[in-house]
Amino acid sequence: MIAVHQMAGAFSPAECNEITRLAASGEARDARLVRQTRDHNLRRADLVWLDDVSGADWVMDRIIDLVRVANRDVFGFDLQDFSESAQVARYGAEREGHFDWHADIGDGPLAARRKLTMVVQLAERDDYDGGSLEVMPSANVVVANRAHGAAVIFPSFLLHRVTPVTRGARQSLTIWAHGPAFR
């Protein structure tokens, strides 16, 4: 069976709050899809790319360590780099924030090289209703841990979604590890 690897406490609550603070200092943009297309029926969120935010370098160091260990222990994929910036997404109830079923591997030059997706829960579980990250490794759906600082890592070809947020706002950190095409 294809693994969905969950790690409680991947980031401490203080680190989650710092990432959220850093993202708030950046310029939020309306979320787009691969090739910069926009479809609010498929995805409705605001994004901040951490490469654009001063003082966020430490986040990438932590991400690299977490993905390296998970890949060694669980996946064994041929990973080469992180070619895209980490992003902080905000799914707010005021916009019915969501991201319908999709896979992260796409047709773009970077999206085609995505091998692992990591999503970290930045918001407190009681800060919002709805907004569950669901991953479908088979006929059964795996719901990601909503604990503050929990991370989930899964192959980028798996279908996943964020259900509509009905109260408050869900904030998460997402990154992709890249490598040669799957065989």
Image (tube, rainbow, N blue to C red):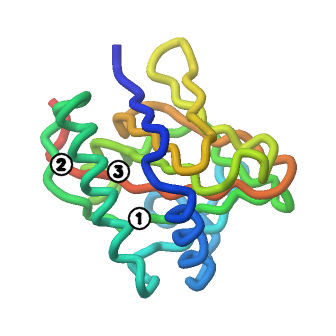
Q: Is residue 102 above or below residue 81?
A: above
Check disc 3: other Cα within 10 Å, few if <14, some if 14-19, many if 20+. few
Residue 111 located left or right of residue 34: left
Give the residue number, with chain letter if any, for mark 3.
107
Provide residue 70's location: percent of width, then percent of height: 27, 38
Q: Amino acid at mark 2?
A: Gly
> Which label is found at residue 179?
2
Which is in the foreground here, disc 2 or disc 3?
Answer: 2
Check disc 1: other Cα within 10 Å, few if <14, some if 14-19, many if 20+. many
Q: Is residue 49 above or below residue 26?
A: above
Provide residue 94's location: percent of width, then percent of height: 86, 61
Q: Is residue 41 above or below residue 6?
A: below
Circle nearer the N terminus (2, 3): 3
Mark 3 secondary-structure assignment: loop
Q: Are marks 3 and 1 in contact (CB under 8 Å)?
A: no
**Looking at the image, which residue is at 82% across and 56% down?**
168
Q: Amino acid at mark 1?
A: Ala
Q: Amino acid at mark 3?
A: Asp
Task: For marks 3 and 1, give the CA distance.
Answer: 19 Å
Q: Nearer the viewer, residue 82 or 108?
A: 82
**Looking at the image, which residue is at 18% across and 48% down?**
179
> Which label is found at residue 86?
1
Circle nearer the N terminus (3, 1): 1
Circle nearer the N terminus (1, 2): 1
Check disc 2: other Cα within 10 Å, few if <14, some if 14-19, many if 20+. some
Q: Nearer the viewer, residue 152 or 182?
A: 152
**Looking at the image, which residue is at 77% across and 59% down?**
92
Q: Nearer the viewer, residue 47 or 24?
A: 24
Task: For marks 1 and 2, give the CA distance.
Answer: 16 Å
